[in-house]
Amino acid sequence: MTSSSESTRKGLTKIATNRLQKEFMEWQTNPPAGFKHRVSDDLQRWIIEVHGVPGTLYANETYQLQVEFPEHYPMEAPQVIFQHPAPLHPHIYSNGHICLDVLYDSWSPAMRLSSICLSILSMLSSSSVKQKPKDNDHYLKNCKHGRSPKETRWRFHDDKV
């Protein structure tokens, strides 16, 4: 996140804090396969290492996700972006924004960070090509510096990659 978004970030509600503490403990004892949480003292911002699945285009590659939990998590989806360098993938923009419905329109408070991570790993693993989204340059041009991907009106039209 940019410094401007850091200064406007609100603290977590009690419900959000309780939920995140529970998820944190689950990640410490049983993280999803292919992921590692880099522990910090910030419950609202997590850095997650993503390890490519053997036998896929992303095998032996490691990426980092930055997860920002909103004040009203889990009623509101977290913001999840890849840190630089983002993987080359038709649904991942070079600024790290991810076009994946569970991060936006299909979010449910019953979902957990582990389910988001597994959806991202599935998306990476099922890809048959390593390439930027076709509209990457246009998106970046129209995406103001520091803009949240949650401010984008995504069109989920391609589930083949």
Image (cartoon, rainbow, N blue to C red):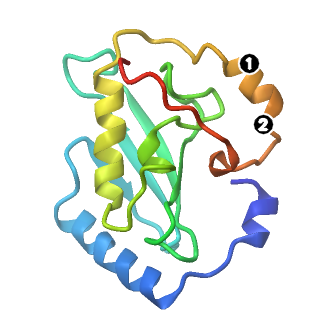
Which quarter of the picture shows residue 25? bottom left
Q: Earlier in the sequence, mark 2 or mark 1?
A: 1
The relative height of residue 8 versus residue 11 in the rendered view (above or below) is above
Give the total number of marks visible in the rendering: 2
Pick whichever, 58 or 151, lies toward us.
151
Q: Amino acid at mark 2?
A: Cys
Find residue 33 and report its image quarter. Answer: top left
- In percent of width and height, residue 97 lies at 59, 38
Which residue is nearer to you in this view: 56 or 159? Answer: 159
Query: Quadrant of the rendered structure where residue 134 is?
Result: top right
Q: Residue at point 46% right, 72% down? A: 75
Instruction: Give the farthest residue toward the bottom.
Output: 14
Q: Which quadrant is the C terminus positioned in? A: top left
Query: Residue 64 at what x, y percent from top left?
Result: 47, 42
Counting from the top left corner in percent of width and height, residue 90 is at: 50, 19
Q: What SS does tag 2 mark?
A: loop
- Residue tagged 1: 137
